[in-house]
Image: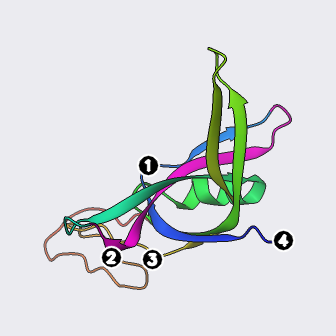
């Protein structure tokens, strides 16, 4: 049997990092994943998929990913049946991430004078001040 899933999409919000009672890290986030085809109206449809990452993957996601960042998730589909407070039977589906990878290169801040990594910034002529080192 096989339960393996690969997803590539953008985070709809910043990951939420929590800890279990024994201190295990768990991060939750949602990926917006575009479908490969358009609907009859010509619109591209998007699925919003809940993802949960545990332990070091949770720490990694919460540290390096933010809303709008492209992520590639490798994991498995998990379906849970539960009963709500009114006694109704409910079902929830989520992806349990085994690995999470960057799906894009690090974005640079637009409209900023901050150089990207590896670039050299020049101090404008006539600008006064002390160097920070």
Element type at mark 2: loop
Q: Quadrant of the N terminus?
A: bottom right
Q: Are marks 3 and 2 in contact (CB under 8 Å)?
A: no
| Residue 23's disc number | none
Kindly indicate the quadrant of the structure image that contains residue 39: bottom left
Q: Which residue is mark 3?
A: 104
> Distance between the Cα atoms at labels 3 and 2?
19 Å
Q: Which residue is mark 2?
A: 115
> Distance between the Cα atoms at labels 1 and 2?
26 Å
User: Which percent across, then down, holds residue 114?
Assistant: 30, 70
Q: Earlier in the sequence, mark 1 or mark 2?
A: 1
Q: Earlier in the sequence, mark 3 or mark 4?
A: 4
Magenta segment includes 120 = no
Viewer-side residue, 46 vs 109: 46
Front tag of 3 and 4: 4
Q: Residues within 10 Å of mark 4 (few under 14, many from 20)?
A: few
Q: Earlier in the sequence, mark 3 or mark 1?
A: 1
User: Which percent across, then down, holds residue 12?
Assistant: 42, 52
């Amino acid at each position: 049997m096989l339960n393996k899933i690969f997803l590539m999409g953008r985070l709809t919000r910043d990951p939420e990092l929590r800890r279990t009672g024994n201190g295990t890290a768990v991060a939750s986030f949602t990926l917006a994943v575009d479908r490969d085809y358009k609907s009859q109206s010509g619109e591209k449809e998007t699925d919003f998929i809940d993802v949960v990452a545990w332990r070091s993957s949770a720490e990694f996601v919460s540290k390096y990913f933010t809303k709008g960042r492209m992520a590639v998730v490798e994991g498995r589909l998990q379906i849970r049946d539960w009963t709500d407070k009114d006694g109704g039977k409910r079902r929830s589906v989520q992806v349990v991430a085994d690995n999470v990878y960057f799906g894009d290169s690090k974005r640079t801040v637009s409209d900023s004078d901050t150089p990207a990594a590896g670039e050299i910034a020049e101090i404008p002529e006539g600008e006064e001040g002390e160097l920070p080192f």
